[in-house]
Amino acid sequence: MLKHSFWLFIGFWLLVSCGEEPTAESQEPIDYSSPVDFDIVLAGNFGEPRPWHFHAGLDIKTNNQEGKQIFSIAKGYVSRLTVNKYGFGNAIYVTHPDGLTSVYCHLKRFADKYEQLFERTGWRDTLDF
C-alpha cells in the first residue's frame, strides 16, 4: 500500500509542480503580415504532393526577378541561418514571441550583416554555388 501511495504522491506532485505551459491564447496577439511587398502569386502550396513528400511551405513567385526583398512576417529574432546547395538553399529562421518560427528559403543571398558573418568566417570561400 505504501508503494502505491508513493507513486500517487509523485504523480500528483508532477501535475502540480509542472504547471501549465503558456499558450498562444495567453500571450499578446502577434500581427502577422506578408513577407513580400508585392502581390502574392503562389508557385507551390502547402501540402501539395511532391514525388517523395508533401510540400512543407508556400513558394511565392517573383516574376522571374532575383534579388527582391523578403521581410519577416512578424517581430522576432533570427535564430538560425542555413546554407545548402540543395533543399532549402540559403534559409533564414525567425523565432517569434509566440514560440512559432517562420522560415524563408531559396534565398539568393542574405542581408549584408549576415553575409559579413560568412565572409568573416571564410564560409563563402569554401562553398561551391
Image (cartoon, rainbow, N blue to C red):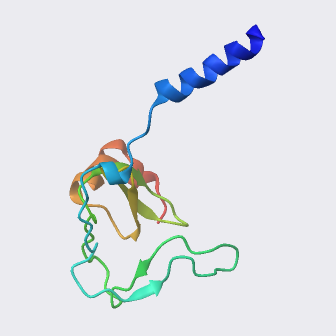
Q: Residue at x 42, y 63 (%)?
A: 90
Which of these two is toward me, 53 or 7? Answer: 7
Q: Residue at x 49, y 61 (%)?
A: 128
- Tell me the quarter of the image containing the N terminus: top right
Say whether residue 106 is left or right of residue 98.
right
The x, y position of residue 91, in whole percent, is: 41, 61
From what the image shows, is residue 54 above or below residue 94? below
Residue 78 showing in the rendered view: no
Say whether residue 36 is left or right of residue 9.
left
The residue at the far top in this view is 2
Say whether residue 52 is left or right of residue 14.
right
From what the image shows, is residue 53 above or below residue 72? below
Q: Residue at x 48, y 72 (%)?
A: 57
The x, y position of residue 115, in whole percent, is: 29, 55
The x, y position of residue 69, in whole percent, is: 24, 73
Q: Residue at x 33, y 91 (%)?
A: 63
The x, y position of residue 38, in whole percent, is: 23, 85
Which of these two is toward me, 25 or 129? Answer: 25
Residue 36 showing in the rendered view: yes
